[in-house]
Amino acid sequence: MGSIFTYISDDIMAHYAERGTCDWCQSESDLYTFYAEDNRGMADRSCVNCIKTLPLRHIYKKDNERLISSLINERYPKGTKSQDQRFALTVEMCDDYRRTPRLPNFIQNDDWPHCCGDFTEFIGDAGQSYTDSYDGFEWWGYENDGAIEYGIEGMMGGEDRVSLFRCLHCPKKYWTFQCT
Ligand SMILES: [Zn+2]
Ligand SMILES: [Zn+2]
């Protein structure tokens, strides 16, 4: 689990940082891809502090946020939490997930892999921010996707990135690829 963002490994943050002036706080800072909008306009990059503190309603929703209540139910089986606790956990995960910068290659939709009732941790793009072993990664995406037969190494190096994730609760790892 990342200490800066739950769903992004600390080790790869620097790879995605772009030095610049944050549109929200005007500080000179490391900026990350992140969509937010208020009555002053829209920005597609923000500093970590603004990502953490902007009002949630100003931050663009991710496409699959509606999954979150079922993830909470998967993580905490029947009888382990009250309805109020489930609601609080859902709100908390939604906050955490929406405040996650858009670093993986989700060109088509925010299909962030999930496992064990939680979103997984983004650990980098194959051959770029991740250069470790490619063994043991499972495909995350449509069952009949053409990328599957090429595998991670077959899809690397093109104009689109192969993004890699690991479960925060079990040893499973996932790879995904979305093309432009
Ligand atoms: Zn800022
Ligand atoms: Zn898992």
Image: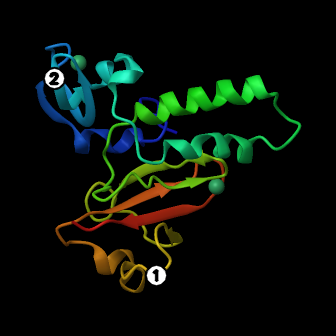
Provide residue 97's location: percent of width, then percent of height: 47, 36
Residue type (three-letter) at the residue carrying disc 1:
Asn
**Quick one: 39 or 19, which is closer to the camera?**
39
Ligand 1 located in image quadrant:
top left
Does the beta carbon at disc 1 come under 8 Å from ligand 2? no
Q: CA distance from mark 2 to mark 1?
A: 40 Å
Provide residue 94's location: percent of width, then percent of height: 52, 32
Q: Relative to 96, is 109 above or below? A: below
Q: Residues within 10 Å of mark 2 (few under 14, many from 20)?
A: few
Colour setting:
rainbow
Asked which quadrant contains residue 81, the reply is: top right
**Residue sitting at x 41%, y 79%:** 145
Q: Residues within 10 Å of mark 1 (few under 14, many from 20)?
A: few
Location of the C terminus (image quadrant): bottom left
Provide residue 152's location: percent of width, then percent of height: 37, 74
Q: Is residue 86 left or right of residue 22?
A: right
Q: Is residue 29 left or right of residue 141?
A: left
- Secondary element type, mark 1: loop
Outermost residue toward the right in this view: 79
Q: Earlier in the sequence, mark 2 or mark 1?
A: 2
The residue identified by callout 1 is 144
Does the beta carbon at disc 2 come under 8 Å from ligand 1? no
Provide residue 107's location: percent of width, then percent of height: 27, 57
**Residue sitting at x 42%, y 43%:** 9
The residue identified by callout 2 is 41
Q: Is residue 142 left or right of residue 101?
A: right
Residue type (three-letter) at the residue carrying disc 2:
Gly
**Residue sitting at x 40%, y 65%:** 176
Q: Relative to 159, is 41 above or below? A: above
- Secondary element type, mark 2: strand
Q: Relative to 97, is 164 above or below? A: below
**Quick one: 147 or 9, which is closer to the camera?**
147
